[in-house]
Amino acid sequence: MSSPRTSPYGASPGADVVLHGTVSPGFEEVHEAFRRNFSERQELGAACTVYHRGHKVVDLWAGWKDARTREPWQQDTCTLVFSTTKGMAALTAAVAHSRGWLDYEAPIASYWPEFAQAGKARITVRQLLAHQAGLPALDEDMDAQKLADLDALARVLARQKPAWEPGTRHGYHSFTIGWYLGELIRRVDPRHRSLGRFFQDEVATPLGLDFHIGLPRDVPASRIARLQALPSLHVLKHEHSLPWEMILSFLWSGSLTARALGNPRSRQLSDFDRPEFHALELPASGGIGNARAIARAYGALATGGAELGLTPATLAALTAPPVLPSRGTKDVVLKAHTAFSLGYTRHCPTLSFGPNPRAFGTSGAGGSLGFADPEAQVGFGYVMNRAGFHLMNDPRALALRESVYRALARLPSSAARAA
């Protein structure tokens, strides 16, 4: 037996990893791509699920959920997925839109009057969900204790001044988009539920998702994979994976990039992989779940959203071309050209989901990914516990989704053939 491959993170299962799960006929190439992530790309533990036309065609998991103990990744293992959470949270806005509670074109202040402070009276829901609101950073330092008090957090959010004229630019609202959306959901929901509770009641339960925005106490810690991440300064060794301008901006503590990505303060991604953060509702960054749940949710979206009661108007809005900022697509936080719409990332130089421009989804720091492709009727989910350093296009997720589309192209009746 060959020795496990080593990396800066330590040993990984390597070529000898045992893969678990199933693939439907025609999707065997996805199984091979998943295996090669372990043998060639230093995967530690991971899972990948794909839905096609409402049917689960790929459901794979392998590796270790904890590198220290070498406990195996199980069928029900969940993990922290960072910004892949944004796509799941955006589903709450889509549900509220379909029910007539939320208008994407309305000013946020029409639902939340206190939000109008500091020149924010005209910011629309659409601008917030497109990262155009000018609110990627807060002037007040945040920590787990402050984030647990939703009423106090709402007051901090309401008094924040935009960093640019809303609608003219966009910049990744890494944490803040979730906090603002969370308060907005509390305001428009007739029952005034928190976003995490709303998501559980209106999205997770109807679809049977093992995904949580705010981890319940009854979920045992033994089910959660342990994240392997290197200190933030290790990013300097990955200058070809991230925009160099972004790295330089992040190193300057006063920059918008550093303020947006560094509050709450952390030394490395794994700082958020602790019980005090797991319990918080962090709709932009704190979701804990598995690939099966992510793919199931996006699979429902890819086939019309009827299971969630989404209307044709909502689906049309989600798949319409994004309304881009007036001063161009250069992201003032990430320092790369990006595109966002209604809580989702859209086709752009930093992330292409596949051949169909109507596809939408979100990726997470470290490499996780979820997306829906309504043309191919595909829902995709990938999660892992070894954090990479790519901005949005982690090679492991890229290899998997490319294998999915190659498989679809070979299916005689695949909708992907028309793409």
Image: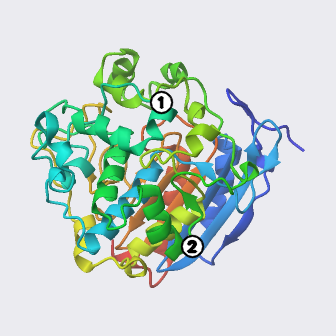
Q: Are marks 2 and 1 in contact (CB under 8 Å)?
A: no
Residue 120 visible? The answer is yes
Q: What distance separates the C-alpha of mark 2 from that of mark 1?
A: 32 Å
User: In the rendered view, does 3 fall on the left or right side of 83?
Assistant: right
Give the residue at x 49% y 53%.
369
Q: Quadrant of residue 359?
A: bottom left
User: In the rendered view, does 67 fall on the left or right side of 277?
Assistant: right
Please tell me which residue lies in front, 208 or 403. 208
Q: Position of residue 370 (x, y in %)?
A: 47, 57
Q: Which residue is mark 1?
A: 143
Q: Position of residue 205 (x, y in %)?
A: 53, 72
Give the residue at x 31% y 34%.
156
Residue 345 visible? The answer is no
Q: Which residue is mark 2?
A: 208
Q: Secondary structure at mark 2?
A: loop
Q: Amino acid at mark 1?
A: Asp
Q: Quadrant of residue 94?
A: bottom left
Q: Secondary structure at mark 1?
A: loop
Give the residue at x 28% y 74%.
99
Q: Residues within 10 Å of mark 2 (few under 14, many from 20)?
A: few
The correct choice, above or below, for 302 with respect to 218 in the image is below
Q: Residues within 10 Å of mark 1 (few under 14, many from 20)?
A: few
Q: Amino acid at mark 2?
A: Gly
The N terminus sits in image quarter: top right
Please tell me which residue lies in front, 148 or 366. 148
Q: Position of residue 167 (x, y in %)?
A: 13, 43
Please tell me which residue lies in front, 168 or 139. 139
